Amino acid sequence: MLVTGPSKRAALIRSWLGAWSQTLHDPALKKKPPRNPVPTGVLVSTQDVTIRRWAERENNIVHWTELTHGGHFALGNTAHCRGAPGQ
């Protein structure tokens, strides 16, 4: 859309702000999302920040494991998990 002149720009901004403010007050957007019924397992590495209560709020957590060593790429960051070159 080509907008020229200050009055057309102002009208465009007003219409955008009006639509945006309506989404803030839309009751459908304030509804809590449905809980995920699928059994879910979580593996948290040492460098990941995951808060369990937030995950449990919307998911059916059945298994939770927190690693004591390794980083985000746990297999590549742990020397004893890597084989010798060429294996």
Image (cartoon, rainbow, N blue to C red):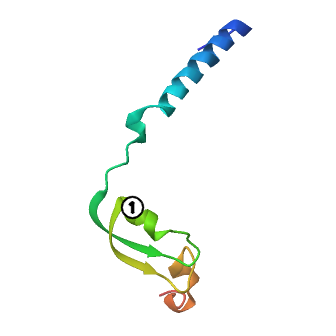
Image position of 11 with respect to 26: above or below: above
The disc labelled 1 sits on which kind of residue? Arg
> What is the x, y in percent for residue 24?
51, 33
| Most foreground residue, 52 or 69 | 52
Point 57% across, 89% down: residue: 79
Point 58% across, 82% down: residue: 77
State left or right for residue 59 relative to residue 87. left
Say whether residue 76 is visible: yes
Bin the neighbour count of mark 1 within 10 Å (Cα to Cα): few under 14, some 14-19, many 20 and up: few
Say whether residue 5 is visible: no
| Most foreground residue, 47 or 60 | 60
Image position of 43 with respect to 54: above or below: below
Image position of 19 with respect to 47: above or below: above
> What is the x, y in percent for residue 85?
55, 87
* Quadrant assignment, res 38: bottom left
| Most foreground residue, 57 or 16 | 57
> What is the x, y in percent for residue 73?
54, 75
- SS at mark 1? helix
> What is the x, y in percent for residue 34?
31, 51
Point 56% across, 79% down: residue: 46
Q: Name the residue under label 1.
A: 57
The N terminus is located in which quarter? top right
Point 53% across, 86% down: residue: 68
